């Protein structure tokens, strides 16, 4: 997984027109290249494991004594730790600056675009918001931003089976394919747009990828894990704001064709 989220010139081969359209939205979000600090977490964890003294000195700050890197390899590790630490600090500052200016979703939309274009920084939250906004611009009213939760069964000889729930630091854009409202319980109709992993598909198919290709990014995810999502936000634009957004961002409007956006036929 690369740390820079970017457009990879995807081709849409899904048999479902709705999934192809969802993948189009995903590609639009990824057409704004930006660095995601959370994409770097697996690399950071491996380096921490191999270099505990350097990590304590430069990241956790729990070490009282300063550790001075000696070898070229250690110096490169220090550079990476320092770069990542500064990047995390910067994305926090950038979010705070844009948040102050974004009093509603209309302003927030321009702010997130500005953050991507000028700061080149953003994580799954910005990705999910922009995907939901693009759906709204194209007439889809039932999309929401949802947070991921994982339940995994563990077995031990003392307590038997234990189900351990864990909220993940991950959000996506989610909507039901039949136009109904997502109720946090039934994911059978749900389509997930997740620009952070660079994919959009029915929830059941995305879950397979979470458990396999992307399992290193999610704590406690196993083959037997059950994955849930809970709605935490919904993008709202007035009719006037929608018209302005369509005029200002024509490239985010679905191209005219014989089939309407998200229609099965």
Image (spheres, rainbow, N blue to C red):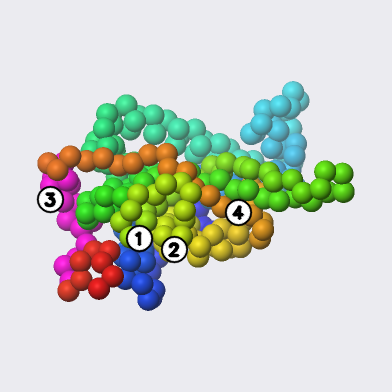
Q: Secondary structure at mark 3?
A: helix
Taking depth in this image into account, of 265 and 71 the one nearest to the observer is: 265
Number of the label disc, if any, that sits on residue 177: 1
For image coordinates 26% across by 40% down, the residue present is: 236
Q: Which residue is mark 2?
A: 202
Quadrant of the rendered structure where residue 211 is? bottom right
Spatial CA span between label 3 and label 1: 27 Å
Is residue 125 covered in magenta?
no
Q: Which residue is mark 3?
A: 247
Q: Position of residue 19 (x, y in %)?
A: 36, 66
Q: CA distance from mark 4 to mark 3?
A: 42 Å
Magenta part, dominant SS: helix
Q: Secondary structure at mark 4?
A: strand
For numbered disc 1, what is the local secondary structure?
A: loop
Q: Give the numbered dot on residue 73.
A: none
Crowdedness of circle 3 by 10 Å Cα count: few (<14), some, many (20+)?
few
Mark 3 or mark 1: name the one nearer the start of the chain. 1
Work out whether mark 2 precedes mark 1 in sequence or the reverse, and give the earlier one.
Answer: 1
Q: Residue at x 42, y 39 (%)?
A: 232
**Residue that sits furthest to the right in the current view:** 157
Q: Is residue 35 left or right of residue 27?
A: right
Percent x, y of residue 123 = 45, 45
Based on the displayed image, in which of its 4 quarters is residue 28 positioned?
A: bottom left
Provide the residue span drawn in magenta: 241-257
Residue 178 can be seen in this image? yes
Residue farthest to the top, as pictured: 64
């Amino acid at each position: 997984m690369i740390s820079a989220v970017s457009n990879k010139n995807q081709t849409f081969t899904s048999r479902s027109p709705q999934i192809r359209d969802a993948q189009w939205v995903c590609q639009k979000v990824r057409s704004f290249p930006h660095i995601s600090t959370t994409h770097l977490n697996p690399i950071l964890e491996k380096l921490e494991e191999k270099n505990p003294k350097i990590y304590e000195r430069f990241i956790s700050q729990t070490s009282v004594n300063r550790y001075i890197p000696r070898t070229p390899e250690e110096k490169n590790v220090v550079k990476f730790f320092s770069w990542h630490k500064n990047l995390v600090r910067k994305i926090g500052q950038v979010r705070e600056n844009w948040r102050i200016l974004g009093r509603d979703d209309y302003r927030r939309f321009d702010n997130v675009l500005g953050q991507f274009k000028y700061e080149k920084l953003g994580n799954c939250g910005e990705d999910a918001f922009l995907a939901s906004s693009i759906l709204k611009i194209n007439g889809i009213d039932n999309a929401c931003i949802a947070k991921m939760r994982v339940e995994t069964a563990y077995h031990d000889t003392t307590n038997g089976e234990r189900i351990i729930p864990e909220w993940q630091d991950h959000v996506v854009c989610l909507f039901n394919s039949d136009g109904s409202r997502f109720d946090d319980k039934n994911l059978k109709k749900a389509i997930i747009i997740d620009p952070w992993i660079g994919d959009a598909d029915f929830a059941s198919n995305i879950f397979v990828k979470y458990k396999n290709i992307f399992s290193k990014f999610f704590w406690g995810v196993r083959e037997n894990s059950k994955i849930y999502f809970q709605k935490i936000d919904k993008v709202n634009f007035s009719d006037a704001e929608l018209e302005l957004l369509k005029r200002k961002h024509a490239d985010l409007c679905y191209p005219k064709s014989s089939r309407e956006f998200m229609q099965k036929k």
